[in-house]
Amino acid sequence: MSSGLLFIFASLFFVSCQIGRFVFYNFSDIKDYKIFPSRLLRAGSSKFIFPVSQTGTFPEEINGISIEKFLAENNTVAFLIIKNDTIHYEKYFGTFDQKSIAPSFSIAKSITSILIGCAIDDGLINSVDEPVTNYIPEMKENGFDKVTIKHLLQMTSGLDFNESNLNPFGTTATYYYGLNLRKKIPKIMLENEPETKFEYVSGNTQLLGLVLERALQNKTITQYLQEKLWTPLGMEYDASWSIDQKKNGIEKTFCCINARARDFAKIGRLYKNKGNWNRSQIVSQSWVEESIKLDTLNGSVSYYQFGWWLPTPGKDFLAQGHLGQYIYVNQLKDLIIVRLGENEGKTNWWSIFSSLAEEY
């Protein structure tokens, strides 16, 4: 075998395994949607387009410098401010434009939560108080008969899961770069008793993904997202959901919905309007309210609920993803902000969003 062919063979073998992928691709990147197999989400024939304000105002400065300079210096690729369902500010940076795709990273946790709510509305899942083992009975031997769907949504399940993005042997790398998640998920163990404490780990939402897949039976999670959200919300563009392997893969529900900024904003609009979309109740109002309410019982914390972060409970909430992907919603101000970035930059986006909301 020639040295060239040997190199190609070795490279393909190297990249095919989990640690090889981690080393080859290095750290996660906003172009990662290109390296994973995925399932397609199609924009429907009827599209919802946010009107663009010709007279609307927006803050000209952030922290004493122009808004555009501030966003660029903090590695932003897309930034939208939507007030009263109208775009007041929309700016893209570098090679990004309105049609550019960005991976959601953990914004997918919030979207997975919506789908769990839809599945309960549809009678596919009975209740958040059901044990995980109603859907994944093989996990009884690991003690998961005492772990409920609500525990997974609130991150109070007690999973033994290493959330580090820097460890190629950690469970986050296993789930992000690895293959055959259906085989890996049932092997998760418990580190603590459920309801002992809040611990943000992606394993909770990937376990929710397997619960949802079992509940859907003969439909993929992507097909359900298409049916429940992508088509009804009039998404403007095609999108995709990354899966663990090309043949019969499962969606990475803890991350990896690949879409455009304007379409991410529609997820915020849905929840701003308590699950109602142009007079159609997409997900029940009670689910939306439960998802973002203040609840500190049984290990839950004031700043996180069913896949949503709560900067100021009762006032605003947000979906947040790795590298600084955000959908911020302030219901009192009728305000949505979408920020997508190459990384977080050197700022506190929660504080920035709250400050911008005060300007309105």
Image: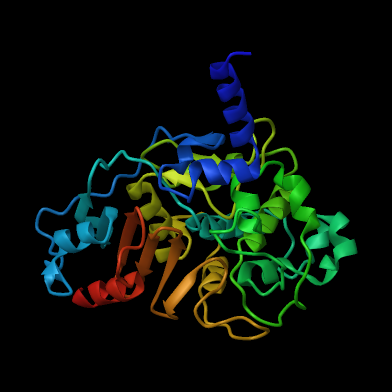
- The image position of residue 71, as x and y in percent, is 22, 60
Residue appearing at x 58%, y 55% in the figure: 254
Residue appearing at x 56%, y 23% in the figure: 8
Residue appearing at x 56%, y 46% in the figure: 22
- The image position of residue 6, as x and y in percent, is 60, 21
- The image position of residue 184, as x and y in percent, is 75, 50
Query: Could you say which quadrant of the image residue 247 lies in?
Result: top right
Query: Could you say which quadrant of the image residue 144 lies in?
Result: bottom right
Q: Residue furthest bottom?
A: 297
Location of the C terminus by quadrant is bottom left
| Residue 269 versus residue 350 in the image, above or below | above
Q: Residue furthest right?
A: 141
Q: Residue furthest top?
A: 1
Q: Residue 267 versus residue 90: which sits nearer the camera?
A: 90
The answer to whether 307 appears left or right of 342 in the picture is: right
Which colour assignment does the render follow? rainbow
The answer to whether 56 appears left or right of 155 in the picture is: left
Q: Residue 339 versus residue 316: which sits nearer the camera?
A: 339
Count the marks. 0
Q: Residue furthest left?
A: 55
Residue 226 seen in render: no
The answer to whether 135 appears left or right of 38 in the picture is: right
Query: Could you say which quadrant of the image residue 137 lies in?
Result: bottom right
- The image position of residue 346, as x and y in percent, is 30, 68
Location of the N terminus by quadrant is top right
Residue 158 seen in render: yes
Residue appearing at x 32%, y 40% in the figure: 100
Q: Residue 32 versus residue 137: which sits nearer the camera?
A: 32
| Residue 268 versus residue 3 in the image, above or below | below
